Image (cartoon, rainbow, N blue to C red):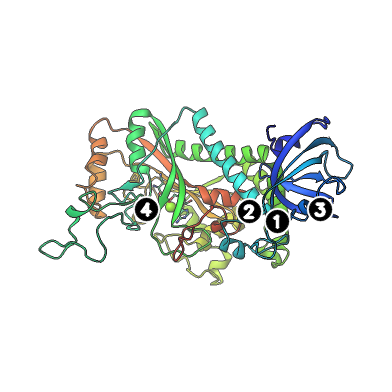
Amino acid sequence: MKRTKIAELLRTEPTNTEVLVKGWVKAFRNNQFIALNDGSCAANIQVVVDAERVDAALTDRIKFGAAIGVRGKLIESQGKGQKVEVVAEELTIFGDCNPEEYPLQPKRQTLEYLREVAHLRFRTNTFGAVFRVRHALAFAIHKFFNDRGFYYMHTPVITASDAEGAGEMFHVTTLPLENIPRTEDGEVDFSKDFFERPANLTVSGQLEAELGALALSDVYTFGPTFRAENSNTTRHLAEFWMIEPEIAFADLHDDMDLAEDMLQYVINYVLEHCADDLQLLENRLLEEEKSKPQHERSPMPLVERLRFVVENKFERLTYTEAIEILKNSKPNKKGKFQFPIEGWGADLQSEHERYLVEKHFQKPVILTNYPAAIKAFYMRLDDPGENVPGPTVSAMDILFPGIGEIVGGSQREERYDVLLQKMREMNIPEEELYWYLDTRKFGSCPHAGFGLGFERLVQFVTGMGNIRDVIAFPRYPGNAEF
Ligand code: 4AD
Ligand code: MG
């Protein structure tokens, strides 16, 4: 007999037909009622065991966490809260689970503890919901781009260039660390290394995606990226997944429109397809926030917050306008910012981003036209603006409530001479990036793109406070377990 997943059974009418379910025991009440879950959905199915017909030696082994199979009739449920249940006719134990030793217990366990047992935490209600929503978001992203004629491009994980020019790369080498070969002048002899040159894990697929866009028009990447930055925050990972669309014959406005459409589309997709999981996550968040002071609680419950983002246009303003708002803001005047806003030119800190999004506008914000000096070399230089104290670039960052920066993007510098000069000013090695410069020599065109941090999106949609709880096995300073 073929097994049916619980998600499908719960959608069926009670037919009195024979079914086979398999899953893990969530609870066993009164030696009679099993709550069984197979991860296909948030809900459990109730299995009714007739103690007279099942061997006591077998019922004794129905413990929290055990993997079992049940063959029986699917009938209309007598109990409240479920339409159907299974009356067991045959019971199989696939894997026992000793409650004395099992790291999971049928009670609330802290997220910090569950991180230590990340190999088992998928089995909790919370993480089941998080990983189902994560999947739905990934699927929706592919669907969004596919429906709009974008091509999915696989950019290399191992690269020889620093796409962001920020020097936060992990080296990739097979050189023996205990006996590194040296050249005559004492430098590391990379000619003896696997690639016969220095190599690293990619920080971004953007530069390669640009090459694709300048032939296929619209492309996107969706892959792992790596940053060796020593950031121990609830928003940073050393290994995270990034979505990077790149569009040809497009400017910054097209780029912002694309990003806003995409975010609203994928959030709406999850609202439509993951209602049960979102409800579970909303309840979890409400429970968690009970112990927090009022001002630290979210102003809206999770689902309402997601609806709000889908239904309202994002606020768009320039960096220069944002600085004015921040300079005149209450926290700045009262000296409440850790990094006071003194004038134009400084990078915004997360406290400033959060003020704009959560206090001033109370909605997602797109900040544009940042000072050239604080942004990457590939961003397009703006024409000098009135009342703008210094050179700016056609950059945009999207800031989300509770998250801060979720998207970073720009129109790209398509003018060969301007790009070359910028690379020289910023010490970007032009020999290493000859291939990037080539696209500006041959058939260059205006183009733009952005990067969406996938885990930050999952965080926003699930309401999870720590980015380490939305990726299966988080990598961060001091941790590469599992
Ligand atoms: O702003 P970033 O560094 O931009 C780029 O990498 C560009 N090449 C993107 C592009 O234009 N194609 O990173 C983009 C996004 C950020 O907005 C953030 O959401 C996420 O990636 N991100 C991180 N997420 C988790 N952990 C980290 N350490 C992250 N660093 C960036
Ligand atoms: Mg950024």
Residue 382: x and y in percent read: 35, 45
Q: In the rendered structure, which amino acid carries the disc numbered 1?
A: Arg
Q: Is residue 13 visible?
A: yes
Q: Which residue is drawn at 32% across and 32% down?
A: 445
Look at the numbered disc 3 and say if its residue's Cβ is closer than 8 Å to ligand 1.
Answer: no
As measured in the structure, the alpha-carbon distance from the residue carrying label 3 to the one carrying label 2 is: 43 Å
Mark with earlier residue (1, 2): 1
Of the two numbered discs 4 and 1 in the rendering, the one whose residue sits closer to the viewer: 1
Q: What element carries label 2?
A: loop
Mark with earlier residue (2, 4): 4
Of the two numbered discs 1 and 3 in the rendering, the one whose residue sits closer to the viewer: 3
Residue 297: name its quadrant. bottom right
Mark 4 = which residue? 375
**Contact flag, marks 2 and 4 (Cβ < 8 Å):** no
Residue 274: x and y in percent read: 67, 41
- Category of crowding for the residue at label 4, using alpha-carbon neighbours closer than 10 angstroms: few (below 14), some (14–19), many (at least 20): some
**Contact flag, marks 1 and 2 (Cβ < 8 Å):** yes
Mark 2 = which residue? 463
As measured in the structure, the alpha-carbon distance from the residue carrying label 4 to the one carrying label 3 is: 69 Å
As measured in the structure, the alpha-carbon distance from the residue carrying label 2 to the one carrying label 4 is: 29 Å
Mark with earlier residue (1, 3): 3
Q: In the rendered structure, which amino acid carries the disc numbered 3?
A: Ala
Q: Which residue is drawn at 53% across and 37% down?
A: 141
Mark 3 = which residue? 56
Judged left or right of residue 369, residue 297 is right
As drawn, 183 above or below 154: below
Mark 1 = which residue? 284
Q: Residue 307 carries which label?
A: none
- Category of crowding for the residue at label 2, using alpha-carbon neighbours closer than 10 angstroms: few (below 14), some (14–19), many (at least 20): many
Q: Is mark 4 on a helix, strand or loop?
A: loop
